Amino acid sequence: MKTIGLIGGITPQSTIMYYQVLNNLASKEYGDKHSAKVIINSVDFGEISKLQSEGKWDVLDGIMANAAKSLENAGATSILICANTMHLTIEAIRKVVQIPVIHIAKATGEQILEKKISKVALLGTKYTMEKTFYIDVLKSMGIEVIIPEKTDREIVHTIIYDELSKGVLKATSKEAYITIINKLEKKGAEGVILGCTEIPLLIQQEDVSIPVFDTTTIHATKAFNLSK
């Protein structure tokens, strides 16, 4: 297995999930005693979230590019950004490394198309839902994307930052997410993208009637398959 580089810490919860998925895949592929070859560069989520709220994406580009370069220098043969939102910095990263940086939206889009779905709902941070960097990738693949109404977007975003990023799981928040997903299904969504790497902590397939796309698992699996 080739070595996978993870830009983690955005949040620690999601980084743990990536590490767990990759090691489970390695164990299944190579045998129980095997684990994944992984290098993690963990950035400070407190610093990242502050810069996000201040709109300082140029500074974030530099932080993420430096993190990626250090992973390449350490021997990584591919890179995963362990956060949907921080794919806003993917072009800055790609400018400074020679190894593949796997886009989470593209990997997710491939899974959506495999299920022959053409219209999906997207849940994530307000940056992921409201900016075009994520939706544009899916649109380029022929996938229509709908997002929650403004009030619901605020609910989704707040739960991510105030609860899920800290590993806090509340039944009331789970119900709020399910209600929002059901609204989007009524608007024609044939599936739902859990477009924040922590959302799978709260929502699983059995919670809703339409197909769920767990971006954390999809992204990590794509990297693992390319590493073989």
Image (cartoon, grey):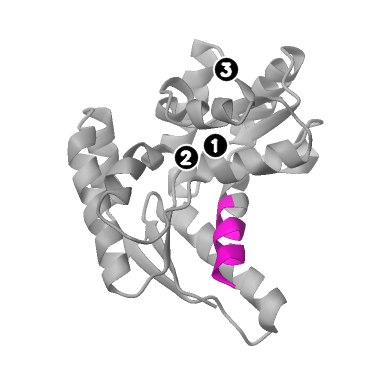
**How crowded is the residue under tag 3: few (<14 C-alpha within 10 Å), some, or many (20+)?**
many
Please state which amino acid type lies under the numbered disc 1. Answer: Gly
Residue for point 69% across, 84% down? 32
Q: State the SS at label 2.
A: loop
Please state which amino acid type lies under the numbered disc 3. Answer: Pro
**How crowded is the residue under tag 2: few (<14 C-alpha within 10 Å), some, or many (20+)?**
some
- Which sits earlier in the primary sequence, circle 3 or circle 2? 3
CA distance for labels 2 and 1? 16 Å
- Which sits earlier in the primary sequence, circle 2 or circle 1? 2
Question: Residue 65 lies in magenta, yes or no?
Answer: no
* Span highlighted in magenta in the image: 219-228
Please state which amino acid type lies under the numbered disc 2. Answer: Glu
Residue for point 22% across, 56% down? 66
Residue 212 visible to the viewer: no
Viewport quadrant of the C terminus:
bottom right
Q: State the SS at label 1.
A: loop
The answer to whether residue 78 is above or below residue 202 is below
| Residue behind mark 3 | 148
CA distance for labels 3 and 2? 19 Å
**Residue 207, image quadrant:** top right
Residue in front for this viewpoint, 154 or 42: 42
The answer to whether residue 95 is above or below residue 185 is below
**How crowded is the residue under tag 1: few (<14 C-alpha within 10 Å), some, or many (20+)?**
many
| Residue behind mark 1 | 195
| Residue behind mark 2 | 163
